[in-house]
Image (cartoon, rainbow, N blue to C red):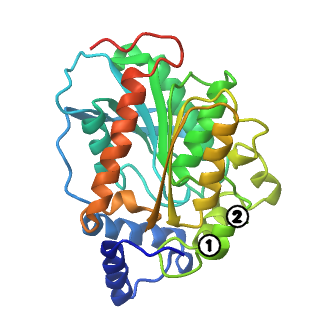
Amino acid sequence: MSSLDPDVERLLALSRQAGRPPFEALTPAEARGAYAASWDILQPPRTEVGSVRNEAIPGPGGSLPLRIYRGAGTQPGERLPCLLYLHGGGWVIGNLESHDRLCRQLANLAGICVVAVDYRLAPEHRYPAAVDDAVAALQWVGQNAAALCIAPDRIGVGGDSAGGNLAAVLALMARDGSVHPVIHQALLYPALDLAADSDSYRRVTAGVPLTAATMHYFIEHYAPSIAVRKDWRASPLKAASLAGTSPALVLTVAHDPLCDEGRAYAARLEAEGVRVTSLHLSDHMHGMLLTGKMVPASNTIVCFVAAAIRLALHHSNSLGLEPAAQ
């Protein structure tokens, strides 16, 4: 396997010295606490945005929390493009706070509205609870576009890891007319096949925070049924066709059990006629976008992701529509 970025090597050395147990050695509650303890250590300081507010909408399981960001420099009444963002964390850990800094960066750098979703987590709420919450959030954003001052024809979906899984599912559902249309999907080292049997699962078994064993731990909590894992709403790579979905950004990293399924998804999108920007980093590990305080390259890649989203949401004409009013 390729070498890691030297800053990542230093980060991993510090983690080994700290003696932190892997997530799979913890209960879900303990894993959530351990994950939360890393945010201030790994992530850069919060950046100021134009505005940020919390919202609670009716969801399939009760009140569904959202956080709505408008990028710095945008005007309160300006009709902005919007990215619905689903956080990572294996469907078990993570929340609005874990990805608050990343969402702020994306809102500012892309000049958009970002709506982050605090979907229900497993094992308390197994598949399809997270999917159902993501659908409810996208529908609410589309139906309330005027009140949110966003362009209803300029909505994209995005997410990292488990959130990338949910974003890919939403893009497929949007293609089929089951949810509000989306014009872009940003899939950041996404989980796309819960069969978990790709070569990268056999390669990435130790030395990084997310190994094959860690992913099996998450998958067992989220979708313990083997039959469920074959459903394309759990494993988008198993969809019969990806043709007709919105243009995509797919980010993959080599030191990641999810690497091969992400690259396979990007290849299928391209082969089936979908425009794809595919970026593969051979010297980074899963979760790198949330390590900018210790890994400078992370900030560069966040800027790249935001630039791609900005271009897609402000200028894409994939639906034959005019760009959003400025």
SS class of the residue under badge 2? loop
The amino acid pointed to by label 1 is Ala
Q: Residue at x 60, y 35 (%)?
A: 170
Rendered residue at 47%/76% (across/down): 208
Question: Residue 139 appears in which quarter of the rendering?
Answer: top right
- In the rendered image, the vertical position of residue 8 relative to residue 239, given as above or below: below
**Callout 2 amino acid:** Ala
The residue nearer to you, when weighing 241 against 193, is 241
Assess whether mark 2 and mark 1 are in contact (beta carbons under 8 angstroms).
Answer: yes
Q: How crowded is mark 1: few (under 14 residues within 10 Å), some or many (20 or more)?
A: many
Q: Is residue 204 above or below residue 49?
A: below
Quarter of the figure with the N terminus:
bottom right
Pointer 1: what residue? 212
- 297 relative to 249, above or below: below
User: Of residues 262 and 220, which is closer to you in this image?
Assistant: 262
- Extreme residue toward the right, this view: 227
Q: Is mark 1 on a helix, strand or loop?
A: helix
Residue 77: tell me if it is visible. Answer: yes
Q: Is residue 275 left or right of residue 84?
A: right
Please rate how many residues cluster around mark 2, counting C-alpha atoms within 10 Å: few if below 14, some from 14 to 19, many from 20. Answer: many
Where's residue 172, x and y in %? 65, 33
Is 178 or 111 nearer to us in this picture?
Answer: 111
Q: Which mark is residue 196?
A: 2
- Image check: 172 left or right of 150? right
| Residue 123 at least partly seen | no
In space, the residues marked 1 and 2 are separated at their CA atoms by 8 Å
**Residue drawn at 63 percent across, 29 percent down:** 245
Q: How many marks?
A: 2
